[in-house]
Image (cartoon, rainbow, N blue to C red):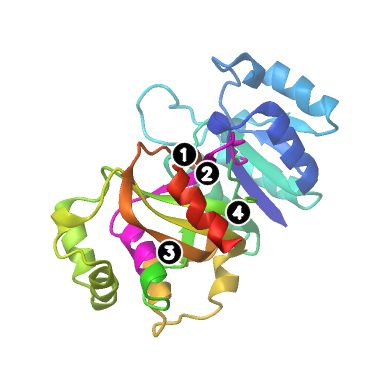
Amino acid sequence: MLLYTAGYAHWTVPALAAELTRLRAVCVDVRMYPVSQRPAWGGADLQAALEASGVSYVHLPALGNPNAGTGGPLALAHPERGIPWLLQCLERQPVVVLCQCPDWRSCHRSLIVAAVQAAAPGIAIAHLEPPPPATAPGELLALTLYQPYAALVVAEALKPGVGKHTETRSRATTYRGWLAIHAAKGGLSYREMMALIRRPLIRAAVDVTGVQCIEEFPRGAVVAVARVRDCVPTEQRYPVPAPDDPNWHFGDYTPGRWGWELGPIIALPTPIPATGRQFLWRWQAPPEVWARLGALG
């Protein structure tokens, strides 16, 4: 049995319909009230569009958040009714639980996931990534990482086997190709950064990049380019813990997550300033970057 979640904030209805068709899944809308400032995502219009594509749509307010829009805590309206219904539906076909929030961890979908896992631990759960945006000539897709994790990717380019070659995410991606690695302008606090770079394996990787102190980490800039060559469940990437592998320490390999496998990785000699975004975003790569990629074929 497969349960997926999706937040439609960065999706289009045709893209969602195509993904639901591919998964052969039913769309279960868990908004308390299926209304949206984007008319296509209103319940009636969404249902009509999905059913026109051959996809079943169900509105399930029993698993809605009664505090949505009020500032109250995340909650489920009637989990005693909604969760058994969801489990029965899962016995017949995969389900995509849909809400607006882009990040399931800060959405009431997280409560649905926890309740399903408690009631039926054997159900596999995955969180759908919005499809990658189309790029124009000269553009690369880009992914923003907090420091020191962006620097760990650079370290892997400079000294393979020391740094980070798998980016772990709560969502899978269908994208395969070159990806700009962008270091976020903000991110972790000074105390959190200090705690991380004091870890011996992280310190060893950071030393490869030449960074000596927190203030020297490049921020708000593209620092590397890497090819996304695969995306695998974290349980497949490391079926058992691998404490002797530095890469194992540089991500979250808890079950139910995804490893974006990177390689080859190219470190840029000089970070290129850029403004990051959430999820995958488009970056106008300068000619010197394309020249380096062209040299690799």
Residue at numbered disc 4: 177
Q: Residues within 10 Å of mark 4 (few under 14, many from 20)?
A: some
Label 4 secondary element: strand
Task: Tell me whether circle 2 and circle 3 mark residues in contact (CB < 8 Å).
Answer: no
Disc 1 marks which amino acid? Trp
Q: Quadrant of the N terminus?
A: bottom right
Looking at the rendering, the stretch of residues picked out in magenta corresponds to: 131-155
Numbered badge on residue 145:
none
Residue at numbered disc 1: 283
Residue at numbered disc 3: 252
Label 1 secondary element: strand
Distance Cα–Cα, label 2 vs label 1: 6 Å
Side of 142 where 231 appears, left or right: right
Residue at the spot 29% in from the left edge and 76% down from the top edge: 201
Disc 4 marks which amino acid? Gly
Task: Tell me whether circle 1 and circle 4 mark residues in contact (CB < 8 Å).
Answer: no
Q: Nearer the viewer, mark 1 or mark 3?
A: 1
Distance Cα–Cα, label 1 vs label 3: 26 Å
Side of 259 where 51 appears, left or right: right
Q: Quadrant of the C terminus?
A: bottom right
Distance Cα–Cα, label 4 vs label 3: 23 Å
Residue at numbered disc 2: 141
